Structures are given as structure tokens and as C-alpha cells.
Amino acid sequence: MIPISSPYIGEEEKAAVMEVLSSGQLAQGPKVAAFEEAFAAWSGARYAVATTSGTTALHVALLAHGIGPGDEVITSSFSFIASANCVLYVGATPVFADIEPAYFTLDPEDVARKITPRTKAIIPVHLFGQPCNMDELTELASEHNLAIIEDACQAHGARWNGQMVGSFGTTCYSFYPTKNMMSGEGGMITTDDAAVAEQARLIRQHGMAKRYVHEMLGFNLRLSDLHAAIGLVQLKRVDGWNAQRQANAAYLSEHLADVPGVVIPAVRDGAEHVFHQYTVRVQDRDDAVKAMSEQGIGVGIYYPTAIHQQPLYKNLGYDLSLPETERASREVMSLPVHPFVGEAELSQVTAAVKNLQPAAVLV
């Protein structure tokens, strides 16, 4: 079976972990500080604040911006549920805008329609490694005095018009094992705003600016030095891995472009897509997934139920129509594109897609 993802742990990562274990400094120590400094430099941000996960990074970022009860935050329903749940965590209300069908990212026109006097922030989700249209979203944010909190949990190293995602506002990353780079688990907030960075540091460590002096209600969301040590090593690898993902995606697109009914991923003009996932559309997805599996190809379905259609959100009273989001949830299927897929395996993947029965592909 060709896997949909393949987390990498090399000898350097193992040695880094052993170094931390030998040091005895395991939690929120020098490796975390070094990881924050290195990640800030790599991302182009002035500050980086490590947390326990991408989810907690989003949670802390919203709190650091002062968002809470009575506020609304616009985001995508075609994403992992954390993109919206983080808004619930702070007592605010998620508001869902539809997506652009070609790119699977927030439709700025629908975002504009959803802005109200209660709106305080937009969370653009750079889904599958594809940047959102940040020109239009930042213009909306500026016009309405809204915070931008980028969800770049799948977009390490992606760029919009040459500018790294993560530099348009406060940004959150995940280092879950399947991401373009990982630390076993963990998250990072990047920002150019010193006040936001300081608030985030307080929140992630029990509101404690100095030992046993607690200035505010906070949480225990500190990253361990074990995770940071892995992240430091992987940060050196991510640009090369992204280049390989892009090469693998180019191979898939070249060999699938003329296959009748197969809709290959579009790359937005001005965007550098880092292909966390290579996502095509198929009509009879269950049949297609079964056929691919029978041919030894691991595929992913992200996300089969949109957030606004999840039981949690239905129980909260969400009853809305997002046609493009709902259509994408029915049709998308991701193919292996990770850096460790070789050309022979890519050839197997494309052959398997070409073997799909006509009923299984879009017409």
C-alpha cells in the first residue's frame, strides 16, 4: 500500500531527543526558546510563541486578541473542526463563509456578506497548502477593523505573491505528525505585534510573567523541549520537503490533466502551494476510494462532513447552506504527494486514477 502520509523521524531527530533527555530540562526550556527564535526567523515574523498543538495555538491567538463572548469570527466550514471550535472556546460565535470551488479556500465575496457589527476577526484557512486570497481578505479586515488570524496548520512555507503566509496577521501552525514538518505534536503562533506575543506567552503559562506571579487567567499549554528538539531539526528540512511535494504534485497534474472527468488541483495566480494534500474531485467517491484501495493506493478524504453540518454545530442551532463547501465535502479525494513517494509509486497512483470507472469520476 502506498500511504497517504509518511512521517519522518531520522537519526538527527532521535539524537536531538536524546540530548534533551540527558539534559534533564524537559519542559519550556532552552530548546523551546531556540525553536521559537528559529521559526520566527524562517517565517519572517518578529515573534513566535510555541504551544502544545495547532488547536491551542488558535485558541491562545484569539484570547491574545481579546476576542470573547458577543464577538463573531468568520472562518471556513471546509476545514478540520479546530478552525471553528477555537472560536467556541473563547465564548465567541463562529460564522461560516463559503469557499471558492477551484481552491477550497474562503470566498472573500461571501466573507464580505457575513460581516456584521459584531465581527471581530477573520480566520483564513490555507487549506491543503493553498494560500487564501490574502489581498482581498486583508483589505476587508482593514476596512472593517478586523483582526486576521491565519490558520496555516497545513501551509508551512506557502506564499502569497512572494510573501510567506503567516506574515499577514497573527498566524497559527501545527506540528502534528502528518504536517509538512512536525515535532510529534505542537503548535506555533507567529506575529509582528509585541502585545499579542506577550499576551500569548502569559496565556500559555498560567498567566505567569515571572515565577509564581499570575497576572491573568491562563492555561498550561507549554511545548516540551522534547517536541521542540524534533521541530528544530525538521525546520531545516521543510523547504526541501516542500520542493519535493511540489515536484510530486507537478508529476500528478501532468499525468492526470487529460484524464476525462478528473479535476486536478488548481493553483491560484500569485500563490505558492506547498501541497500538504493533493486533492482531486470525484463524483462517486465511495466507489473511487474502494477502487484505489484495491489497487494499493492509500487515499484521504478531507473533510467528508463540513463543520456546520457536524452534530455539535447542528445542536448549537446552525442551519445554513454553503453550496460549494457541501459539494467539496462530497467530492474530494486526496492522493499521496508526500516527499517520500518515488516516481514509480507516483506512476502507480496515476495509473490507478486512470483505471477508475467512468461512473466514479466527475463529468
Image: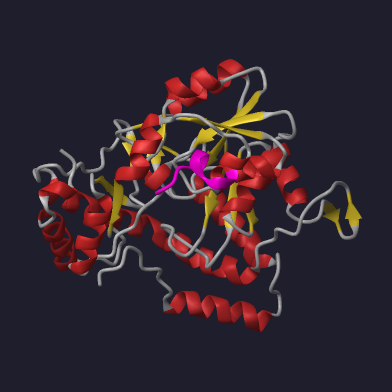
Residue placed most toward the observer, 67 or 318:
318
* Residue at image point 64% right, 52% down: 56
Q: Does residue 160 sit above or below 190 in this rendering?
A: above
Q: Is residue 113 left or right of residue 37?
A: left
* Residue at image point 34% right, 40% down: 328
State which quarter of the image contains the C terminus: top left
- Image coordinates for residue 152, horizontal then vertical, percent: 49, 45
- Image coordinates for residue 44, horizontal then vertical, percent: 51, 43
State which quarter of the image contains the N terminus: bottom left
User: What's the coloring here?
Assistant: secondary structure
Residue 73 lies in quadrant: top right
* Residue at image point 52% right, 68% down: 184
The region drawn magenta spans 304-312
- Image coordinates for residue 292, horizontal then vertical, percent: 21, 62
Kindly tell me whether residue 11 is visible in this rendering.
yes
Considering every residue shown, the one lying at the far right of the view is 213
Residue 196 lies in quadrant: top right
Residue 357 is inside the magenta segment: no
Residue placed most toward the observer, 122 or 11:
122
- Image coordinates for residue 149, horizontal then vertical, percent: 58, 37
* Residue at image point 14% right, 57% down: 350
